[in-house]
């Protein structure tokens, strides 16, 4: 996210001080219809948002003593501004927190309507596909991976961990139930991974600390072991150029009682691959025998063709997606490029008994040409055939389920969410108690991790946390 520029401050001031015709959400005051846009159509301006305070602590900090406990930034907020007329609307959504950059832009865009056609340009979050929880077709916005589980603990809407991207989005309605839409994203941003701290990813740690994984003596001949090893480690990746432009096209319609969609997307995989180059020992200018090892992040381009489906069947709200992700490694033997893959998800929600609701989703990725995968040991680094996918299973399957029940006229909700990595044999369990009264929401939640420490979830098994929050929405 970017620091808010001065012209946005000016726009916000105009939103707050300008005349208001009608109230869409939040607060506003009605005036006569003489307040209009330049086209003569009535102008509606609205302001809304959320103010919240929260504390989150990790259980191992509590055990270590009060001097080790850090509860994080207590305050956070959102301000949402919207101005709309009959043929256009402008939106600015801001995040407010106590960090070094206290105000950041969550979304900011303008949309124009031309009958059945509309076009939007700006910084936006856009969801494609029908899965509830990050299905294979939801490819447009990258994620802040460090906030997934702390947000999932007490929230069902996870738009907050998506990173808005600059884009041009257009849609055209074909009849009453069909729509075609296209998106163009001028440059690329990957998922955000932390490289240190509690939520760092173990694989990223390894890539950033390769010298710690190397043997004291380099392999091969004795004279080789005497060489000084020069290492160049990964740097922050930037791709703010049209060389990394992305685009997609999506068609949705209704057939009988089923909603179906088909999409094509060309973009860049948001998780990094790695390119490792090793230069064998040579005599340096200073007369010292030395060797060079460089590690660089790279991001792979790919084409995606996908289908999705949603329907109510026998009381189940069913959702399904399937996608083919086609990378440049069509032979499966390029260690710096991810293999092509097939991905699918299937989910449903249904009220069971005693007012209990179940929401469940299974998502799986199947790697193609898996038998062509190389290795990722020390020897492969020096041999020049290190493979980023080495050691990973053929499939990656994740089950996400949430059980919830409401009491006292739906004011009190008891909920428990579980994420299970089947191949990794690890899981995360997140119980929550949520009380909502009008515009006030109080939540007590926790997150607990278990399983293999090499798994995507098990690597966080020292990160058990408790979280309490109160929020006012206006």
Image: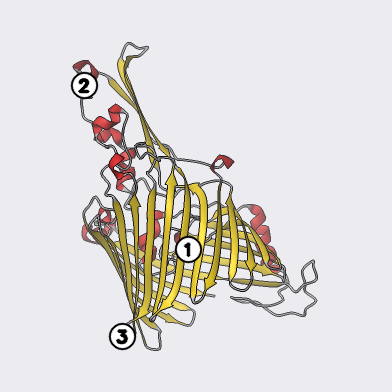
Where is mark 2, residue-wise?
220
Is residue 72 at all visible to an observer of this figure? Answer: no
Q: Residue furthest left?
A: 222
Quote the CA–CA distance across marks 2 and 1: 52 Å
How packed mark 1 is, by other alpha carbons closer than 10 Å (few <14, some 14-19, many 20 or more), is: many
First in sequence: mark 2 or mark 1? 1
Q: Secondary structure at mark 3?
A: loop
Where 315 sits versus 246, above or below?
A: below
* Between 359 and 437, the one nearer to me in the picture: 359
Mark nearest the camera among 1 and 3 is 1
Given residues 409 and 76, the one toward you in this image is 409
Q: Nearer the viewer, residue 122 or 197?
A: 122
Quarter of the image holding residue 312?
bottom left
User: How many residues crowd mark 3 within 10 Å: few (<14), some (14–19), many (20+)?
Assistant: few
Q: Secondary structure at mark 1?
A: loop
Asked if residue 416 is positioned above or below residue 427 in the image, the reply reads below
Q: Quadrant of the C terminus?
A: bottom right
Is residue 253 shown left or right of residue 64?
right
Identity of the residue drawn at 47% across and 52% down: 304
Per the image, the residue denoted by label 1 is: 129
Residue occupied by mark 3: 353
**Residue 249 at x, y = what percent?**
56, 56
Q: How is the image coloured?
A: secondary structure
Relative image position of residue 424 (x, y in whole percent): 24, 55
Please report the residue visible at 48 percent of the width from the left and 52 percent of the height from the top: 100
Taking the spot 59% from the left edge, 57% from the top edge, the residue there is 182
In space, the residues marked 3 and 2 are separated at their CA atoms by: 67 Å
Q: Residues within 10 Å of mark 2 (few under 14, many from 20)?
A: few
């Amino acid at each position: 996210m970017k620091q808010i520029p001065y012209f946005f401050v000016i726009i916000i001031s105009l939103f707050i001080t300008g005349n208001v015709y009608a109230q869409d959400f939040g607060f506003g005051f009605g005036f006569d219809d003489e307040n209009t846009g330049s086209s003569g159509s009535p102008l509606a301006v609205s302001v809304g948002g959320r103010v919240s305070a929260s504390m989150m602590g990790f259980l191992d900090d509590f055990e270590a003593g009060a001097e080790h406990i850090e509860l994080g930034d207590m305050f956070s907020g959102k301000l949402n501004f919207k101005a709309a007329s009959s043929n256009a609307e402008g939106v600015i959504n801001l995040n407010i927190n106590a960090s070094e950059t206290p105000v950041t832009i969550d979304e900011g865009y303008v949309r124009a309507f031309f009958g059945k056609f509309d076009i939007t340009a700006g910084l936006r979050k856009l969801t494609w596909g029908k899965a509830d929880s990050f299905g294979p077709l939801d490819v447009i916005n990258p994620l802040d991976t460090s906030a997934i589980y702390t947000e999932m603990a007490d929230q069902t809407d996870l738009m907050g961990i998506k990173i808005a991207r600059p884009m041009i989005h257009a849609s055209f309605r074909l009849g009453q139930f069909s729509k075609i839409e296209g998106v163009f994203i001028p440059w690329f941003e990957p998922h955000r991974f932390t490289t240190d701290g509690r939520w760092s990813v173990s694989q990223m740690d390894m890539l950033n600390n390769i010298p710690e994984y190397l043997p004291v003596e380099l392999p091969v001949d004795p004279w080789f072991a005497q060489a000084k090893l020069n290492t160049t480690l990964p740097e922050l990746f930037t791709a703010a150029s049209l060389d990394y432009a992305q685009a997609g096209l999506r068609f949705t319609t209704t057939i009988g009682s089923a909603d179906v969609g088909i999409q094509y997307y060309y973009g860049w995989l948001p998780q990094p691959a790695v390119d490792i180059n090793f230069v064998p020992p040579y005599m340096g200018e200073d007369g010292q025998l030395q060797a060079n090892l460089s590690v660089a992040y790279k991001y792979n381009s790919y084409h995606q063709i996908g289908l999705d489906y949603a329907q109510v069947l026998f009381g189940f709200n069913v959702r399904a997606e399937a996608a083919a992700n086609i990378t440049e490694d069509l032979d499966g033997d390029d260690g710096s490029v991810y293999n092509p893959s097939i991905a699918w998800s299937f989910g449903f929600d249904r009220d069971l008994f005693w007012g209990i609701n179940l929401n469940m989703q299974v998502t799986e990725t199947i790697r193609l040409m898996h038998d062509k995968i190389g290795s990722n040991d020390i020897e492969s680094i020096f041999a020049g055939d290190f493979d980023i996918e080495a050691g990973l299973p053929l499939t990656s399957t994740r089950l996400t389920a949430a059980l919830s029940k409401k009491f006292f006229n739906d004011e009190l909700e008891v909920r428990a969410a579980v994420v299970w990595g089947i191949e990794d044999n690890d899981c995360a369990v997140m119980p929550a108690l949520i009380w909502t009264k009008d515009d006030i929401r109080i939540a007590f939640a926790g997150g607990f991790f278990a399983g293999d420490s090499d798994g995507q979830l098990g690597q966080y098994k020292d990160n058990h946390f408790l979280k309490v929050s109160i929020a006012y929405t206006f």
